[in-house]
Amino acid sequence: MHETDMTKALILTVRNWWEAQPERPQISQVHLTVGQFTCVEPVSLQFAFEVQTRNTFLETAKLVIQETPLIAFCHHCQQEYRPEIGVQYACPDCRSPMEDIRSGRELKINRIEYCSDSAESYASNL
Amino acid sequence: MHQTFDAALEINLLHANQEGADHNRAHFDAWGITCLNIMSSPGAGKTVLLEKTLAALNQTLKIAVIEGDMTTELDADRLRQYRVPVIAINTGRSCHLDSKMVAGGLHQLAHQYTPSDFNLVLVENVGNLVCPAEFEIGEHAKVALLSITEGEDKPLKYPVMFQAADCLLITKIDLAPHLEIDVNRIIANVRQMNPGVTIIPVSAKTGEGLTVWFDWLQSQIPSAEKIASKLPDLTSA
């Protein structure tokens, strides 16, 4: 389950960012991009995130994963195409091998969404 | 009132592992060592390939092995018979080696031996076609093994591994006459995602293809003159 390791890396990166903020804000969402041509399964990542963030500063944070499709560029046909993962990777028109991957290899922490609660809003919640 | 803010991070999820891999590679380069990351599913024949390799090249090259194994030292013990340093790394429940584990192995090697005496480090990764493909360890080239008993479709099903490989060994090729498998189909399936890969059919049992593998392996090691030209000139000091 390498998603466990990936989640550890993710939490560490977010923690480093969080600790560098003077007001230690409440993080509401962590946005990732995960390409379909990686060995990462978003469902496993979600599960690992849920388990590993329990009772931490990320307990209430939501992991938002955007998947990107596998897109390759065929230099012979001068056009992009979408290889069918598990079936066919060569260009469907000219059968040239998949050489130039334009999308699908991403594994990226894009951004963090956080709330800055003022004192009044805490008070009004009481 | 509460307001929502955004902070852009744009950081790769494997950033820390990648930094560790680059660090390991810098050490290998400084020591004049070529590092190969050897990967396959369990049982494809990584250890027996290493045995044959050590037996044949141990005199010509100075080889050390880093052996990733989930819980045992069985493979490491097999390789120690060839009188090469074998650093065993138990990965515990982790299904791949990462750059930090390999760094630990390199520390052990540097502690017990003089690393610059070696010119080749063979890393046997954990048997797994999925995760090892994503975790660089500081290697100069990736070697994947696929035994013909695994089936023609495996490159299609585990594309990240086969797309990243610099050399693919199709192992147990001596079994081909006994199986309904089309070796050319395997090769075509790999080539459609990795046209530049070197493909070598081998059999550790009959020895078929092994000299081609040994030649490829030696071609990965920069010549002594090349290494010397990269080192600082101490004679002028």
Image: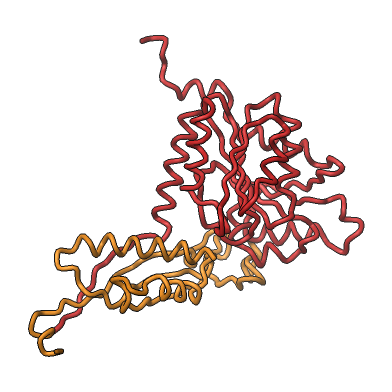
Image quarter (top left, top right, bottom left or bottom right) of the N terminus of chain A: bottom right
Q: Residue furthest right?
A: B178
User: According to the image, what is the colour scheme of the structure?
Assistant: by chain
Q: Tell me what hue chain B is rendered in.
A: red
Depth order, front residue of A39/B193: A39
At 74% from the left and 46% from the top, the residue drawn is B200
Depth order, front residue of A80/B222: B222
Q: Is residue B189 above or below residue B34?
A: below
Q: Position of residue B52 (x, y in %)?
A: 76, 37
Q: Position of residue A117 (x, y in %)?
A: 14, 79
Image quarter (top left, top right, bottom left or bottom right) of the C terminus of chain A: bottom left
At 55% from the left and 71% from the top, the residue drawn is A81
Q: Residue furthest top?
A: B236
Q: Position of residue B147 (x, y in %)?
A: 76, 55
Q: Is residue A47 above or below residue A16?
A: below
Quadrant position of residue A61: bottom left
Residue A72 in view here: no
**A42 left or right, relative to B84:** left
**A55 left or right, relative to B228:** left
At 56% from the left and 59% from the top, the residue drawn is B93
Residue B224 in view here: yes
At 55% from the left and 20% from the top, the residue drawn is B225
Q: Tell me what hue chain A is rendered in.
A: orange
Q: Is residue A33 above or below residue B130?
A: below
Depth order, front residue of A112/B160: A112
How many numbered circles are shown? Answer: 0
Quadrant position of residue B30: top left
